[in-house]
């Protein structure tokens, strides 16, 4: 069985990978059947021959989960379509403040909705009284 997988290169704690097609029983750093591109996870730089990868998949090669993700998020020119998600962990005080602000905003919206309801209710009563 053929696999499309990553072949690790680079120094300790500075990995770079080549995306290769290889027999599943061959060791990770063995001789590949074909090299499809390269990927650097530190800088998120990738170059991939997407057409060749898809043709290997059609022939029956199984991509690993990581390679399948890379192929899926690859642009037509072979670069990675990556958008960094900004996640910030807030302190307990900041979390409490954000929750209080959200609660106040919800209460204000409910109050505005009730005010609009009160404005439209007399107008409806006047139209029914005239009829």
Image: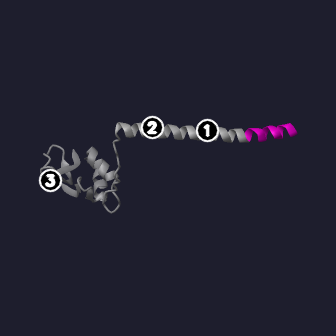
Gap between marks 2 and 3 measured at Cα:
46 Å
Badge 1 marks a residue whose secondary structure is: helix
Q: Do the residues labelled 1 and 3 touch (CB within 8 Å)?
A: no
Q: Residues within 10 Å of mark 2 (few under 14, many from 20)?
A: few
Placement of the C terminus among the 4 image quadrants: top right
Q: What range is drawn magenta here?
A: 120-131
Location of mark 1 (residue): 111
Q: Which mark is residue 99?
A: 2
Q: Where's residue 44, x and y in %?
A: 27, 55
Badge 3 marks a residue whose secondary structure is: strand
**Quarter of image, res 43:** bottom left
Gap between marks 1 and 3 measured at Cα:
61 Å
Q: Residue 9 carries which label?
A: 3
* Left or right for 98, reference 11: right
Write the residue at 33% across / 56% down.
74
Q: Where's residue 47, x and y in %?
A: 26, 60
């Amino acid at each position: 069985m053929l696999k499309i997988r990553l072949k690790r290169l680079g120094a300790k704690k500075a990995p770079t990978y080549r995306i290769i097609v290889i027999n599943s029983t061959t060791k990770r750093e063995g001789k590949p059947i074909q090299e499809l591109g390269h990927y650097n996870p530190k800088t998120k730089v990738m170059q991939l021959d997407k057409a060749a990868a898809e043709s290997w998949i059609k022939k029956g090669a199984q991509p690993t989960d990581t390679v399948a993700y890379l192929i899926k998020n690859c642009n037509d020119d072979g670069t990675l379509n990556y958008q960094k998600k900004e996640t910030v962990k807030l302190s307990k005080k900041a979390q409490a403040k954000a929750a209080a602000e959200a609660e106040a905003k919800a209460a204000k919206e409910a109050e505005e909705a009730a005010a609009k309801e009160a404005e439209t209710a007399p107008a409806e009563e006047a139209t029914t009284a005239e009829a």
